[in-house]
């Protein structure tokens, strides 16, 4: 479970406010969507949660752990698929995954077993022993997800994982995220794609201009906005149609 309270992050000596007083809870066995236009503060929020950025103020807990005081423990508890994917292009898919597994201290035999399982679940047989240089977006996302899950984390953060994916790969990704939910994991999905939120998320946190504009289930947001579909509700709740990409 993730608990974020009053998170604030600024840049350029406080002149640029990226995240301002953001609070939300993401529970186990649910997919929580961080929905907002580009530049809303979603990625900055996630980077604070996985300790890449230090908040100016506010507090966080990941499975009861404070990332500020125990950053290494949080890194072991989280699985992260960042927006950049961050693969080593000179390594094969297997070598990328194995490297992160070794960083997590997983013993070699167990690590090989886990890699084989992820290869099967993510349908990676054709790419697992190829260098990742030249991989398609879908192939890179699969490797990034396998790398994030190699240590079997209970909490998984994904930053716009479907960017650049074709229709069939997107459908496969959604099926896999539902599987993570069914296993009781806490899944946090950052996105600006309305269809993704409608198809996957149990709860939605709408972020605009670094602040939370609204949160709740899809039905709750529809009732609050008085609109008939999620896209119109989103526009009304953030108060603008600027930046809508769905």
Image: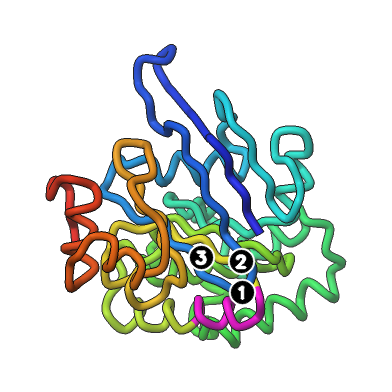
Q: Quadrant of the N terminus?
A: bottom right
**Disc 1, SS:** loop
Check if mark 3's residue and mark 1's residue have beta carbons within 8 Å: no
Above-or-below relation of 244 to 176: above
Q: CA distance from mark 3 to mark 1?
A: 34 Å
**Image x and y of residue 56, in percent:** 55, 23
103 vs 35, nearest the viewer: 35
Q: Secondary structure at mark 3?
A: loop
Using the rendered image of the protein, determine whether residue 178 is visible from the camera's viewpoint. yes
Q: In which quadrant will I find the C terminus?
A: bottom left
Determine the residue positioned at 26% across, 49% down: 37
Q: Position of residue 104 (x, y in %)?
A: 78, 56
In the image, farthest residue toward the left: 241
Q: Earlier in the sequence, mark 1 or mark 2?
A: 1
Which residue is under mark 3?
131
Q: Toward the viewer: 169 or 17?
A: 17
Q: Residues within 10 Å of mark 2 (few under 14, many from 20)?
A: many
Judging by the rendered image, the residue that carries numbered circle 1 is 29
Return the x and y of residue 99 as percentages of the image width and height. Answer: 70, 58
Of tags 3 and 1, the one toward the viewer is: 1
- Left or right for 105, reference 22: right
Looking at the rendering, the stretch of residues picked out in magenta corresponds to 176-184
The residue positioned 23% from the left and 60% from the top of the image is: 225
The residue where tag 2 is placed is: 186
Between the C-alphas of marks 1 and 2, the distance is 6 Å
Mark number displayed over residue 57 = none
Q: Position of residue 115 (x, y in %)?
A: 69, 76
């Amino acid at each position: 479970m993730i608990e974020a309270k009053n998170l604030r992050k600024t840049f350029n000596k406080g002149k640029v406010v990226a995240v301002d007083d953001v609070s939300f809870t993401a529970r186990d066995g649910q997919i929580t969507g961080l929905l907002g236009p580009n530049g809303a503060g979603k990625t900055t929020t996630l980077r604070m949660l996985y300790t890449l950025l230090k908040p100016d103020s506010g507090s966080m807990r990941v499975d009861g752990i404070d990332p500020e005081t125990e950053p290494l423990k949080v890194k072991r508890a989280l699985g992260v698929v960042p927006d950049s994917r961050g693969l080593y292009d000179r390594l094969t898919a297997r070598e990328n995954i194995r490297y992160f597994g070794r960083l997590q201290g997983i013993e070699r035999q167990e690590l090989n077993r886990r890699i084989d399982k992820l290869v099967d679940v993510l349908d990676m047989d054709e790419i697992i022993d190829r260098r990742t240089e030249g991989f398609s977006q879908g192939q890179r996302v699969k490797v990034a997800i396998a790398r994030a899950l190699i240590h079997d984390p209970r909490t998984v953060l994904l930053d716009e994982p479907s960017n650049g994916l074709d229709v069939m790969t997107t459908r496969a990704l959604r099926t896999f995220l539902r599987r993570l939910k069914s296993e009781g994991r806490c899944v946090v999905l950052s996105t600006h794609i309305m269809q993704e939120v409608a198809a996957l998320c149990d709860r939605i946190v709408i972020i605009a201009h670094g602040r939370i504009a609204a949160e709740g289930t899809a039905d709750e947001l529809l009732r609050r906005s008085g609109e008939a579909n999620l896209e119109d509700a989103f526009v009304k709740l953030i108060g603008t149609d600027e930046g809508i990409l769905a």
